[in-house]
Image (tube, rainbow, N blue to C red):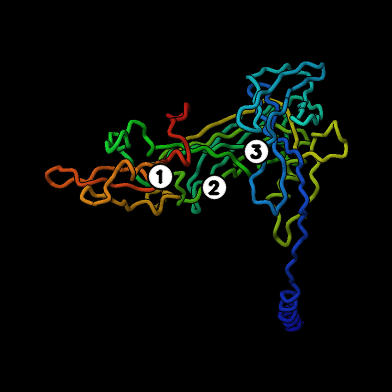
Amino acid sequence: MCVWKKLFCWVLLPLLASCVTPFEPEVLNEPVTILVVNGYINSGGVTTITLSRTRNLAVQEPYQPETQASLAIEDDAGTRWPLQEGAPGTYVSESLQLPAGQQYHLRIQTQSGRRYASEFVPLKPAPPIDSLSGRIEADGLQFYLSAHDDVGRTQYYRWEYAETWEFTSGAWSRLEKQIGDTLLPRTDDIYHCWRTENSTAVYTATTVPLSRDAVLDYRLLLIPPTSSRLRFKYSLLVRQFALTEAEFQYWEALKKNSQNIGGLFDPLPSQLTGNVHSETNTTEPVLGYVGAGTVAEKRIFIDNNSLPPTWSLRNEGYEGCMLLDTIFKKDASFNLALFFSDPNLRLPVGPVTDRAGNLLGYTYQTTACVDCRLRGTNSKPSFWP
């Protein structure tokens, strides 16, 4: 009997492999621009809402922000708190303290006059984050998070995070071009910078099946041991939200549609049903779920001297910037005014002198290798130690 089972498997496996044929789904060529609403009504601080439009898969352009819209938070008594547009498609409120015991929703009117509104939701306070830690493991630095609610009112959790890290460009420019052929010491540091990136994946958990409303050692983020984010100092800011059951189901569906697809046993994509609807055209689809409540935050810093010395932390993006080129004064084509006339092309790095200190020329590199502001900001964050 066992022999027949083995024979059956060896015959069946090639047949299964030969039955797999590629499937190319039809892609819509007509423009499909669905409004996407992303944000959360923060009852104890600043509310930030982003509006954008979807695009077809065949279009290579980035997502288009929905600009010049009018947004306001509204409670069930009709009181409104407006939001103002900062960056294109990003709308921000003042720091608010919304009264408890009421329900809130978001009202939107686009520049074209289309009106949208989210459903009224209650304020749901988020419990504090108990702990946020980074632990050294075989595959990198793993961040864990724990939280609990003694009253048992939370049950549905969601997290977002913002990473900030210090980095340097590929070459340190100590000179800058002034008038004519004069190169003076650089007054602004374009070698040391900071970069911030927000999370893009969906992180959720529920304690409904558990005897206690507590999340212990939730695996949040893994940074590999070669990442340039850990070369100097690194910061992780985590925001914790308490969700309603309907909001949790929305984020779970979004997670399955965006992260857990592609494998043989992964769930099939499903239609997202949020709580934002069009008041102008009831048949128009809208993507997004706007919840409301307080937000709990916790920040952690990681210094590179706390990491294993065997980790090879690369300066990603600057691998080809280590070698410098040189322009010599003896060259017939030596003309600094012309050579460094386009700061988007190349920048001076430092002087080249002989043993007697006589100036022979200057080293230089491409602007992409020299100016770290192309990848971040040289303004030190206010929270940086």
> As shown in the figure, which amino acid type bears the numbered disc 3?
Val
The residue positioned 48% from the left and 27% from the top of the image is: 383
The residue positioned 39% from the left and 48% from the top of the image is: 366
Residue denoted by label 2: 222
Task: Locate residue 17: give its quadrant.
Answer: bottom right
Calculate the distance from the C-alpha at mark 1 to the C-alpha at mark 2.
32 Å
In which quadrant will I find the N terminus? Answer: bottom right
Residue 313 in sight from this viewpoint: no
The residue positioned 75% from the left and 78% from the top of the image is: 15
Q: Earlier in the sequence, mark 1 or mark 2?
A: 2
Q: Nearer the viewer, residue 179 or 306?
A: 179
Task: Locate residue 303: give its quadrant.
Answer: top left
> As shown in the figure, which amino acid type bears the numbered disc 1?
Thr
Q: Residues within 10 Å of mark 3 (few under 14, many from 20)?
A: many
Q: Nearer the viewer, residue 184 or 17?
A: 184
Residue denoted by label 1: 367
Q: Nearer the viewer, residue 253 or 375?
A: 375
Whole-percent x, y for residue 205 in the image: 69, 41
Tag 1 secondary structure: helix
Q: Is residue 165 left or right of residue 321?
A: right
> As shown in the figure, which amino acid type bears the numbered disc 2?
Leu
Q: Residue furthest right?
A: 282
Q: Earlier in the sequence, mark 1 or mark 3?
A: 3
Tag 3 secondary structure: strand
Q: Residue furthest front?
A: 332
